[in-house]
Structure formats: C-alpha cells, structure tokens
C-alpha cells in the first residue's frame, strides 16, 4: 500500500462529501493511436498495464504505469485557505458562490495544498482502463452526477451531462486529444472514503 495525492476541483470534492462520487477518470498520458485494434489489455505484477495489438504500423505493445493500485490510499488536494483555527476549503462555499454572496477569502490552488491540510482520504478499490465514451449509467452516477435524468436512467441526457462535465476539465488546446470527441483511453479509479491512516496526523 502506498499513500498518494489526487487533485479534485471544488464541485467534485462536494460530490464526495455528499456521498455521490465514488470514482474518477483520468486520461492515460502518452500517444495511443486512435486506429489501434487492441489484442488484449492486461495488468502486470510490477504495477503496469500492457496494451498489445495491431497498429497501423504493424504489431506492437505499449506499457503504462498505473496511477495507483488497489489498496492504495489517496488524500484529496483541494482549493484551500489558511484559517485562524485550521483550514478552510472552497468546496464548503460553493452555495455562496452560486448565489453571488461575497466570500472574501484568499484561496490557494489545490496543487499547493500541504498533506497535513487534507480532510478526505480515499482507499482505491479498483483500477481499470476504458475508452471515455464507454461509460454506462452506473459509471455516470458514480462520477457524482445527480440530476433527475441521471437518477431516472435517461442515458441520452446523462451522456450529454457527462460530456459537458468532462469537457469543462479539459483545456481548449488539448480538446482534440483529450476532449469528449477524441474519446481517449482513461484510467477508471474507484474508491471508498476511509478514516485517516494511523500513521498520518489528521488536520485540526
């Protein structure tokens, strides 16, 4: 077991706090030809994934390091601020922002959040590989989308909502590679919320 960090925006943090989000998808970085016909995909003992198949240039195989493994602990790094007693988190102020209420707090980017400020710890329960558009209605729900259409199982509307959410996380210059229409290969990381590990000091 290893302890790693994971970056999540305020909306996704709120979804975890509301017990709606139990998985996340992350693009597999590196060149993966769109016209590859995969023979198989398999996990290797050293924590890599092997993708073997027929490419336009012939037979080949690529290896990718898993971002985490089953049993690993992830602590969430989120947008935060120093407080007089402990820390503040932007996810707690989402409703205020939506209603236009002034929140005069100097926020720090999630990437700069120290480990001791982490309040959410997750245990990885599964890691697998999918194409982005292969997500099903259960996967969309587990990603934290909770509209009436998603709960009712309306796949057309649910997919559109998922598409909008995904594209909102991709910078414009990378949309041709990682956007919805590109249908990239992604890591699907499933998790459950756990208490702080015994050797880690919880935030105060």
Image: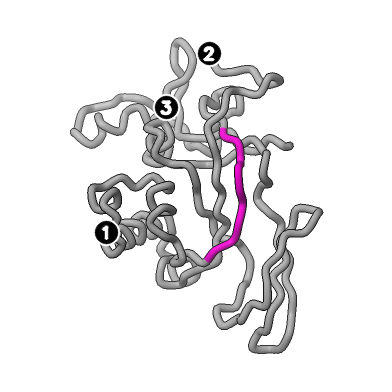
| Nearest-to-viewer mark from 2 and 1 | 1
Q: Is residue 125 magenta?
A: yes
Give the number of the disc on residue 89.
3
- Relative placement, left or right, of 73 versus 135 is right
- For marks 3 and 2 on the same chain, the one whose residue lies earlier in the sequence: 3
Tag in front: 1 or 3: 1
* Residue ID at (54%, 31%): 113
- Residue 14 percent across, percent down from the top left: 38, 35
169 horizontally vs 96: left or right: right
22 falls in the magenta region: no
Magenta region: which residues? 122-130
Q: CA distance from mark 2 to mark 1?
A: 43 Å
What residue is drawn where x is 55% and y is 66%? Answer: 185
Of residues 82 and 121, the one nearer the viewer is: 121
Q: From the viewer's perspective, is 73 left or right of 77?
A: right
The residue under label 2 is 204
Q: Residue at x 41, y 53 (%)?
A: 138
* Quarter residue 13 falls in: top left
Q: Residue furthest bottom?
A: 57
**Secondary structure beneath label 2:** loop
Q: Quick one: 148 or 163, which is closer to the camera?
A: 148
On screen, residue 55 above or below 123? below
**Residue 51 on image: x %, y %:** 69, 70
Residue 124: x and y in percent read 61, 41
Circle nearer the N terminus (2, 1) = 1
Tag 3's secondary structure?
strand
**Which secondary structure dominates the residues rendered in magenta?**
strand
Secondary element type, mark 1 = loop
What residue appears at the point 57 percent right and 23 percent down from the top-left corner?
Answer: 195
- Residue labelled with disc 1: 154
């Amino acid at each position: 077991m290893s302890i790693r960090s994971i970056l999540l925006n305020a909306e996704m943090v709120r979804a975890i706090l509301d017990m709606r989000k139990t998985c996340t998808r992350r693009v597999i970085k590196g060149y993966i030809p769109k016209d590859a016909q995969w023979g198989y995909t398999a996990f290797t003992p050293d924590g890599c994934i092997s993708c073997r198949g027929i490419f336009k240039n012939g037979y080949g195989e690529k290896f990718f390091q898993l971002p985490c493994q089953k049993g690993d602990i992830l602590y969430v790094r989120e947008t935060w601020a120093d407080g007089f007693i402990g820390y503040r988190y932007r996810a707690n102020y989402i409703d205020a922002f939506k209603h236009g209420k002034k929140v005069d707090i100097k926020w720090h980017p999630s990437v700069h959040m120290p480990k001791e400020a982490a309040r959410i710890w997750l245990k990885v329960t599964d890691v697998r590989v999918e194409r982005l558009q292969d997500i099903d209605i259960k996967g969309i729900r587990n990603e934290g989308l909770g509209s009436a259409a998603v709960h009712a199982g309306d796949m057309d509307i649910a997919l559109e909502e998922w598409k909008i959410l995904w594209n909102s996380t991709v910078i414009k210059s990378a949309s041709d590679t990682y956007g919805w229409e590109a249908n990239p290969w992604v890591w699907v990381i499933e998790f459950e919320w756990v208490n702080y590990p015994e050797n880690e000091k919880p935030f105060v």
